[in-house]
Image (tube, grey):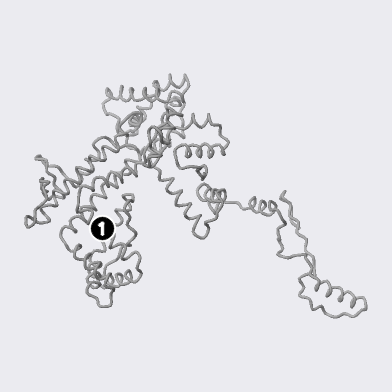
Amino acid sequence: MIKCQPVKSANAAGILEAIDEAVNTMGIREDTWKKKVVCANFDGAAVMMGEKTGVAGRLKQRIPHIITIHCVAHKLELAVLDSVKGCEYLVKFEDTLKTIFKMYYYSPKKRRELTEISELLNERLAHFSGLKSTRWLPSRLRCLKAVEKNYTPTVVHMENMAEGSDVKAEDAAKAKGVVQEMKTEKFVRFLHFMLDYSTILSNTTSRLLSLKTKPGEYQKTLDTKFTANQDGSICYCGTQLTKSQRPARRGEGTDKDTFGAEIQKIIDNTVKYMDNRFKNLHEKPLSCFKVFDPSTLPYPREELANYGDEEVDYLVTDFACLLDAEEKEKIPQEWMDLKVRLAERRGRKVDCLYRDLLSENPEHLSHILLLVKLMLTLSPSTAICERGFSCMNRVKTTHRTSLHPETLNDCMQLSINGETVESFCPDKSIRFWMFSGKGSRHLDHKTQTRTKSSEMEGNAQEEKADEGDAMPSTSSGIFSSETSVEISDSGSDTD
């Protein structure tokens, strides 16, 4: 995090101006940071990703070699949302889930009753968190798991609410509608299908975040539970699904007949929309970095000899403004040595492999490692920004809405980039607090301002002392002695 910078306007020009102002606070010259920036990652807002007048397009004009990436976590969620729009029942299915979560999320009384029922059934409840329309896949998967795990206690509780006399008419009507839907065969089938579907796509996220997904891999991941037959139909968990897309007419067929057609449509749309949204990962220069993945190296040494030469040459040309003449000449020569080293360590994890390689920094690979550093600099996700928003919400709460932007920025910097409590040394901060204030710090928690009554009392005591009359003082003793505190900034002893 560089800075939490307010924007003067929410258009592309205002955002770019805020970026320039934030980077300038670090003392980095504009021509320096523009030369060093390799990648920019955005969410899907049009003002950010616009190719002509958006922030991404304007950055491309200013920095020709920059790579702009749409956050893969957002794109995966959008692809899934697009794919399920073609299934009418999924709209009803998700509305039922939202009703369940709202009933228990906002009512401690209903949660307590549900807990009592689960204890009678000797089952352990999962937490009903909020379910929103747009959430990342892992969050949606947790919601589905909670419904599946709490299915029996929820149905029993809903039935009691629907028939209860002491329940509000509105809650009773909602419970009756929910329990009727939950007890249908179609709801149960879709619940387990969406669990498998979300699990497979959530596991795909890690591959997308590492930019290692290959063309057609989405279909391979879906084939874990969904296998294609020769006639083009799909078999889900060993059950033959119908190939017909025609919806059943009234009185014709059952939920089981239309289930297969809807599943087929969802899977086809998922592959279609994911391939469409992630097609830029298969385009140059991003696709060229796949040659640095040890798992892609061919085993025959004859094929290994020329493997990746074209991709490395393209990267050298694309990032020519970041490389000097010697590096452009040496990188293709060192590529063969790096290939052999990677082939010998195929079984190791990529992050551990390059961590050790960069820490060792062998001299005969010093130039080709520049491309490795460029690859590791690419940011496929804006998750770090989302965590920054969460930090800002923790700092600027409803009780602290008047925080100055500079104060908010300082608090966020301490939370995100600051030291841990265990490793923090407070001496410098304490000295800064004591000596940087406009007024004096009352370190002894006393004041030397004497009121008129205290002065009169002090004069009376002095007169009695002069007369030799030793009477005890009735003063509270606050001003009976003066305390001098001297603190040296040089670290000397304190008197």
Mark 1 residue crowding within 10 angstroms, few (<14) / some (14–19) / many (20+): some
Give me the residue at 14% from left, 52% from top.
259
Total marks placed:
1
Give me the residue at 47% from left, 39% from top.
15
Residue 475: image location, x then y, percent: 78, 76
The amino acid on which the numbered mark 1 sits, given as a three-letter code, is Asp
Which quadrant of the figure has residue 254?
bottom left
- Residue picked out by circle 1: 95
Residue 335: image location, x then y, percent: 38, 24
Viewer-side residue, 401 vs 83? 401
Q: Is residue 101 left or right of residue 407?
A: left
Which quadrant of the figure has residue 275?
top left
Q: Considering only vertical position in the picture, is 330 above or below 421?
A: above
Q: Is residue 461 left or right of residue 424?
A: right
Q: Quadrant of the C terminus?
A: bottom right
Viewer-side residue, 98 vs 52? 52
Residue 344: image location, x then y, percent: 34, 31
Residue 478: image location, x then y, percent: 76, 71
Q: Secondary structure at mark 1?
A: helix
Q: Outermost residue, left direction?
A: 252
